[in-house]
Image (cartoon, rainbow, N blue to C red):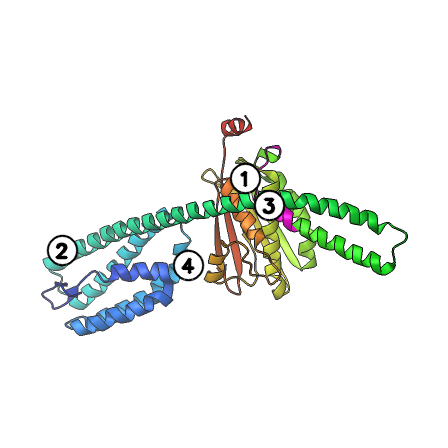
Amino acid sequence: MIMPIRLEAGFIFDLRYIPFIIVALFGGYRHVLPLYILLNIFRFYVGGEGTLHSFLFSTGVLILVPLYSKRFTRLESKGRIIAAPIFSFLTMGCYLISLAWVIKDLDHQFWMLVVDALGTHIVVMLIIMILIEKIITNIKGRDRILYSEKLNVVSELAASVSHEIRNPLTVTSGFLQLLAKSKTMTEQEKRYVNLSLLELKRAEKIVSDHLSFAKPQSENMVYSNMREEVDYTHEIIMPYALLHKVDVRLTFNNTLKAYYDRNQITQCLINLYKNGIEAMTEKGGGTLFIDILEKKQNIIVRIEDTGIGMTNEEITRLYEPSYSTKEEGTGLGMLMVYSTLNKVKGTIEVHSEKGKGTTFLLTIPASTSETFEMNKK
């Protein structure tokens, strides 16, 4: 903007709309508004012909482009790389049309500007988007490696500690059950014993949750398209959903197969279903959508609820061990989900809006039959 291209008609031209469009698409209204104010203040400071025209046009861009921000951020990397230059081309095209309408006398210099402006904006936007997506990929890869290391540490620690704790719990529970059958005990003493048994049962459940972080067990490994696990978990969760006035809608369109621990995948799905149902309890019910489909050699599991939703901070903290959005939650359920997906080299995406609901998108790479046979050996 300090050194723009100056036309003989008095108008100036620069590359300010490139960062403007990028921020509008990635950040929406909240992030692009300060940039809009800053660019227009500086444009008024530069002055010259077209100042008012530039202000009106930038206002139009401010209103229209951020409308597509949410849709844009949900695109895959290649989709964003293609979409951003298209937005840049359309913006510049509209700008040049409006400029032609103001100038009216379209000489050779103007048509040279049209070619240079469109070409420059498309090429520069394409290069910047490739670099941005590369940075995003590197950051996600780094975070995935760091989180994988954390999960491995939690897995090993949980497995070793849980196995040691389970044995004395089992023995204690057995003796208490024998003691409860004694005819010489008073009703008060029996009540104490029953309370102790309930607490032991709760302790065993916590131990079982920790054991779910352990490595997949060979006897539980299957090569399947997840149909059996999805049907089973659907039947299991239906009474719980009806109790909370939640309608469950299931669709299954998958033929791809993967190699996984059946017990861990089953528990993973149940945890996500329960989270979705409980998120709708405060709203008096809702609908839980479960979609299993295939896409580019990946099994996609999409679980969407119409519950209370989460903030961006809450979504970020879902990765933390023992963090829960529920008052009585332990946080182990979501940690188990991330751990299970990590073991099958899968990924999870979370999209949520406060007051509207949350969507969990699980991506599990399909395996070949050769890979299954190798793992069996």
Q: Which residue is mark 2?
A: 112
> Nearer the N terminus, badge 1 or badge 2?
2
Label number found at residue 70:
4
- Label 4 sits on a secondary structure element that is helix
Circle 1 or circle 3, nearest the eye: 3
Q: Which residues are magenta?
A: 206-219
- Residue positioned 26% across, 70% down in the render: 38
- The mark closer to the camera, 3 or 2, is 3
Earlier sequence position, callout 3 versus callout 2: 2
Distance, label 3 to label 2, CA atoms, is: 73 Å
Q: Is residue 226 above or below residue 150?
A: above
Q: Could you tell me how far apart the alpha carbons at marks 1 and 4 are, in whole angstroms?
A: 27 Å
Q: Which residue is mark 3?
A: 161
In the image, taking residue 67 as reference, residue 184 lies left or right, namely: right
Q: Is residue 274 above or below residue 7?
A: above
Q: Earlier in the sequence, mark 3 or mark 4?
A: 4
- In whole angstroms, how far apart are the C-alphas of marks 2 and 4? 35 Å
Total numbered labels placed on residues in the image: 4
Q: Residue 147 location, x and y as percent?
A: 45, 48
What kind of residue is marked 1?
A: Asn
